[in-house]
Image: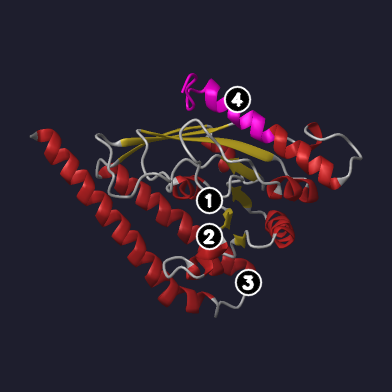
Amino acid sequence: MSGRLDYAWRLCATGLAFVGFGVCGVLFSVLVFPFAWLWPHRASRQHAVSAVIHWFFRALVAVLRGLGVMELEVSGAQALRAGEPAIVVANHPTYLDVMVLLSLTPRACCVVKHAHWRNPCFWGIVRAAEYVSNADATALVDAGAKQLAAGYTMIIFPEGTRSPAPNRLHAFSRGFAHMALKAGAPIVPVLMDCDPPAFTRQLRWYDVPARAFRMRVNVLAPLGVAELAAHDTPAAIAARSVTNAVEAHITQHLFDYGFFKTGN
């Protein structure tokens, strides 16, 4: 009986958290976004909006943990708070990955799906925070390099969408590699895991697992693009080398850390 009550509680709490997130997103778009664009200084406006988003997601993570819906285990997060701009490259097992990474990174900018520019919960947020759309590959690289130059850490999920299944990744796109080469920024690989699985491509929000899910985040040592691509190679070849190296690096560490299981 207690197991059923616990499940019912986590189901209701999860639903309330999603409703609260949606309502806050709409209110931000309708109320905060118009005022944000009246802010006279663009740089300070973006900084303020990014700080609000960071603290909002920190609060949301704290609520989910406090309600017993989610557990969080983080290693190496100091690299995300170091202040030096970098490109965070992470695998993408769940819908909550961006929420967790934004809660851990005080000065962040994201590459997000172009569809979010029309989503009623997100359109104001992504515009006010000057997030980068993935609609155009060339514009993505230029915009990302500009954000890095302004001191922001870029958060990128190079799979483009959530991972297709446990122990599998989509092939990485090369946008982050071109961005790193253009800006000369380090790449910070991040491993994400959710056990038991929740909010994956195969599960809806109401498919609540039998116990609180545990999000695990391992931030690995930064990688310099100079050590991943041969000197004086054409940009396209260098970007391919960097992409392949980072994808192999993340995949190997997903197995090493036990986030991926052998034999499955």
Q: Of helix, strand and loop, which one carries label 4?
A: helix
In the foreground, 246 or 152:
246
Q: Earlier in the sequence, mark 4 or mark 2?
A: 2
Residue 91 in which image quadrant: top right
Query: Which residue ends up furthest to the left in the rendered image?
Result: 1
Residue 151 in which image quadrant: bottom right
**Residue 106: which disc?**
1
- Whether residue 247 appears in magenta in the rendering, the answer is yes
Q: Mark 2 to mark 3: distance in Å?
A: 12 Å
Residue type, numbered disc 4: Gln
The residue carrying mark 4 is 252
Contact, CB < 8 Å: mark 1 with mark 2? Answer: yes
The residue carrying mark 2 is 50
**Residue 12: which disc?**
none
In the foreground, 147 or 246:
246
Which circle, 4 or 1, is nearer the viewer?
Answer: 4
Q: Mark 4 to mark 2: distance in Å?
A: 32 Å
**Residue 42: which disc?**
3
Q: Magenta segment, which residues?
A: 246-264
Residue type, numbered disc 2: Ser
Give percent across and percent down for residue 41.
62, 74
Q: Of helix, strand and loop, which one carries label 3?
A: helix
Contact, CB < 8 Å: mark 3 with mark 4? Answer: no
Image quarter (top left, top right, bottom left or bottom right) of the N terminus? top left
- Whether residue 48 appears in magenta in the rendering, the answer is no
